[in-house]
Amino acid sequence: MSAPAPATPAVAPPPMDLPSVVRLAELADYVVPLILRAVADLGVADLLVAGPRPAAELAGELGVHAGTLLRALRALASKGVFTEVSPGVFGLTALAAPLRADHPLSLREAYPLLPSDLRAWAMLGHTLRTGEPGFDAAHGEDYWTYLAGHPEESVRVDGWMRSVNRLHLRTVLPGHDWSRLSTVVDLGGGNGAFLAGLLRRYPGLRGHLVDLPHVVAGAPAVLAEAGVAGRCEITAGNIFDPVPAGADGYVLKTVLPGFGDADVVRILTRVRAAMRPDSELLLLEAVLPPGDAPDVAKLFDVHTLVLSGGAHRDPAATGALLARAGLRLDRVTPTPTLTVLRAVPAT
């Protein structure tokens, strides 16, 4: 007879930690984020600037279903976004105020509810298994190609960037001495919202915006509104094309995390070829911190992977990629939002 198998040691059940269970349920919730995005899209906050109003009245003005809007606003009010001051009547709260279009740091356009993004996130299991973008699996083409073929969604992405740039202009610009530059090239700068803000703050600076044709199509209006159109050149082109040469500074703002290492080196090599010996490259990025420290870069890192297959990096990883392109990481300056990584020619 064979010897009996050894008994499996008993494992004590985990303690009954109800707060952790509740917190986990909150973290797993996608109901509130989706409602928030839909209500932001409608512009509900703009209709409450003068004071609380009935949901039925708001629905009539917006052309939506009254009962559904009521339920959506009640859900958000339970989380502190809007407040139900009396049955069916809603007003703004501190959390709802940034959804107003006239807020100095308006996030009105920052949370677009794009079905293409949702379908990509539904493929997160595929991304976890393969390391490949969920967007490609969901749509049969990469993120950038898709946006080029869907200009209506590209405009929504531009709106998101416009909202984010309001915050970045206030927080990132103090992280570098821009006054020492006379010319700057913003590569992958979208519709020029960040560059327009930079030029407006530094009247002696001239700019050059480079991005895809369908993206820079909206740049003239953005630059004109900021009063800087006469100091900014626009080039429609690909990020992998030769870069305008001889500028004092080159800016890549939240661009490189959208690409894998090989493509990043290709981009940086193009920039290095355009730089003078005394030029500087400024990478404005969300940088990965070590350990368990909470940081939005860790969330953006997964978001970027799902959409484009890129990655956020720590300064050491970025420095290694810069070195492969003939550049040297010279200074790392954190700001309340993005980090400014300054690079110069290695030789």
Image (cartoon, grey):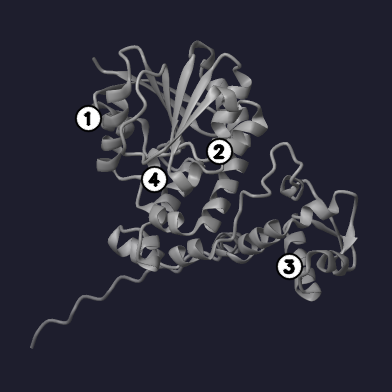
Q: Which residue is mark 4?
A: 258
For badge 2, the amino acid type reads Ala
Labelled pair 1, 3 in contact (Cβ < 8 Å): no
Q: Which residue is mark 1?
A: 324
Mark 2 or mark 3, which has the lower sequence index?
Answer: 3
Q: Quadrant of residue 72?
A: bottom right
**Mark 1, secondary structure of its residue:** helix
In the rendered image, residue 97, in percent from the top left (x then y), is placed at 77, 46
Q: Quadrant of the N terminus?
A: bottom left
Q: Is residue 269 above or below residue 161?
A: above
For badge 4, the amino acid type reads Gly
Q: Quadrant of the C terminus?
A: top left
Residue name at image x 75 percent, y 47 percent:
100
93 or 196: which is nearer to us?
Answer: 196
Q: How far, Cα to Cα, is label 3 from label 4?
A: 33 Å
Residue 312 visible from this viewpoint: no
Mark 2 or mark 1, which has the lower sequence index?
Answer: 2
For badge 1, the amino acid type reads Arg
Q: Which residue is mark 3?
A: 72
Q: Is residue 154 above or below residue 105?
A: below
8 on left or right of 18: left
**Mark 3, secondary structure of its residue:** helix
Q: Residues within 10 Å of mark 1 (few under 14, many from 20)?
A: some
Q: Of the numbered discs in the image, which one, if any, rests on residue 219?
A: 2
